[in-house]
Image (cartoon, rainbow, N blue to C red):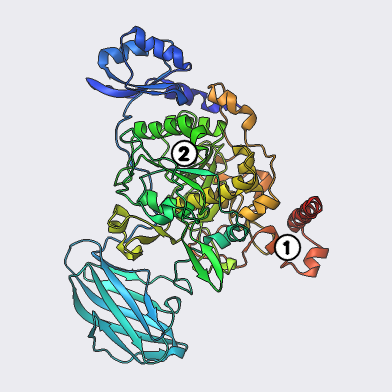
Amino acid sequence: MKASRFIAFFALCVAFSGTATAEAVYLVQGTDYQNLKDSLSAEGIGASEEFPLINALSVTLDDQQKRLLESKPAITRIIDHVDSLEAPSDDDASASDNCAYLGSIFMRSTPSSLVWPIRRKDHRTSYLLNVELTWPAEYGAGLSVFFDSKPIPHEHAVIQGERAFLTLSNKLALQQDEHLLSLIFDQQAPTQSELTGTLTFSDNCSSPLVKSYAENNDDTHFNRLIGASSLHELGVLGQGVAIAVLDSGLWSHPDLELDTKGNQRILARFDAMAGREPIELFDESGHGTHIASVAVNSGFVSTNGSIHYQGSAPDAYLVPIKAFNTNGQATLIHLLRALQWVADNRERLNIRILNLSFASHPRWPYWLDPINQGIINLWHQGVVSIASVGNSGPDPVTVGAPANIPYIISVGAVTDNWTPDNQSDDFVPLFSSQGPSPLGHVKPDLVAPGGHIEGLTRPSSTLTLEHPDFMKRAERIAMTGTSQAAAIVSGATALLLQLEPQLTPDQVKCRLMSAANPAILPDGKLAYSPLKQGAGLINIERALTLGDNHCDNGQDQLIQEIQGEIFFTGPVELDDDGTPIIPDTLSTLLANDPAIDAPITGVAWGVKAHVERLSPQEINEPSERQKLWLQRYADELRSLDARRKLD
């Protein structure tokens, strides 16, 4: 539908932007590509780069040439600052404290000891002043403490009730890249998750110990949470599907370059900053490597005879594209060059998925953003585009671009709270950006695991230097953010497209959203607004068996939008305080959001989990809300039964 309330704004935005310097690089855009080229050629102005994907040319103009082009009817926009570096609006959600030293999130353990690495972040002088520890009393109060193998005198731990407490107050100089605080218990040592600890440093910084998985191996855990592990067991690993990762490059590592059978799976590399296809695509940042690892890592962990792959699609083809520098910055020209290359090579390389793990503050309405225009065109051409919503929550209207595009798949984050086999304590973290989009669209579309996601990265990359406390080994790091969540969805989508390659991007989005598992409270209300959880947590196994192909994603008007004839706004408006007004059809299902960075009591993820916990009375005499879930559950059972009969 047209949005008349934005027409005046539209008129302002299509006007020629910015104040030109004596000579600068501009993006010149028109409605017809050939007419645009002819118009510039008639004035003797040559294009430095062509972007037919969005009917645009990159040109260098002086003031006189710019004024001349502003009068040409074939030219609709002249955009400035296209070669300026801009950083995404949010950093990753794993931002470490501004301390000279930090305690690692990974402890090393033996049956009787725990070792806490303390790592240097910068070269300021610092001292470890205080250590506070507490653990279950069942492990006793007797232990020895060592700092870099030297014993630290201390009082005995004190047992109070069910916990033991120990405080160490020693001024210990920190001078090495890594120091080790060793706790050797007289009896069995507690696990890291059972231990609570805080390190206090002289630079007015403290570093708390985080929880950990029960088994501190290299299992990434998220594949079980999204239903991918069961498909992996059936041999569905993403074979034949190419994922393009538009990011900061790729570190050469066997688990990224080779699939599970040892076959080369990188089809091409493109450096959008240099405009060439190199043999190596050096990743200064490390972010691109980590995102690729989450999506396609072919490494595995064997537990009790079962193989757990570390990437969502360990056999998918990979096409890394570099547009971001060491600091996570990119120019509009570099991003457009990357998208144009995807358009030019998608058929040759069978690129079906484009991962966009970045988010920037929207500079224009979604339909006027040149990057968004390119992504919309790629979607129309058959490329499933998957973007992270950003890490700017918990306020509403914080969804970044390009996730603000209504057509594509926009992904928020959920965390397993370090308990992968217990979904009752999973929650949407506050950092995950919230909808609606600036034009009222419901975003995110769904959520995926985005907390402490382990993966590969280049040693000594920006990522490792900024987050030494998140390093497990020189080449392995755990990161948190919607970037990782988007990569998981990209990998999961490859599994779907392996089995059903005929699906269009709109059908893929419909499959994922219609089969997602929403967070539901015992009374049948949604634990989180759709502006936080979208349709719910992705489950790729359900998408294959229960997902729908027929959803209204605005696809009927997409061609008109590409031609600039129409655009549309979403159903969500804001009140005078900036609070989203949820449509009446959904408002009765919403609970009061506690806005906490912690689990919500009583949450069940998914219709099945919710219905199967209802009492006989709630099933026989359901409320109006419960009737909705019971009906949906019955529909799912009928759909499964029909599939079995077809098989």
Mark 2 residue element: loop
Left or right of residue 506, residue 145 in this image: left
Residue type indicated by callout 2 = Pro
For the point 35% across and 34% down, the residue is 334
Q: Position of residue 73 (x, y in %)?
A: 43, 10
Give the quadrant of the N terminus: top right
The crowding category of the residue bearing disc 2, from other C-alpha atoms within 10 Å (few below 14, some 14 to 19, many at least 20), is many
According to the picture, the residue beneath numbered tag 1 turns out to be: 611
Q: CA distance from mark 2 to mark 1?
A: 36 Å
The crowding category of the residue bearing disc 1, from other C-alpha atoms within 10 Å (few below 14, some 14 to 19, many at least 20), is many
Q: Position of residue 217 (x, y in %)?
A: 44, 70
Mark 1 residue element: helix
Residue 345: tell me if it is visible: yes
Residue 501 got which mark?
none
Q: Position of residue 373 (x, y in %)?
A: 48, 30
Q: Position of residue 530 (x, y in %)?
A: 59, 49
Vertically, is 67 above or below 447? above
When asked about the image quadrant of residue 420, the answer is bottom right
Which one is nearer the viewer's eye here, 88 or 470? 470
Residue type indicated by callout 1 = Val
Circle nearer the N terminus (2, 1): 2
Left or right of residue 403, residue 27 in this image: left
According to the picture, the residue beneath numbered tag 2 turns out to be: 402
When asked about the image quadrant of residue 456, the answer is bottom left
For the point 42% across and 44% down, the residue is 358
Vertically, is 174 above or below 595? below
Which one is nearer the viewer's eye here, 474 or 213? 474
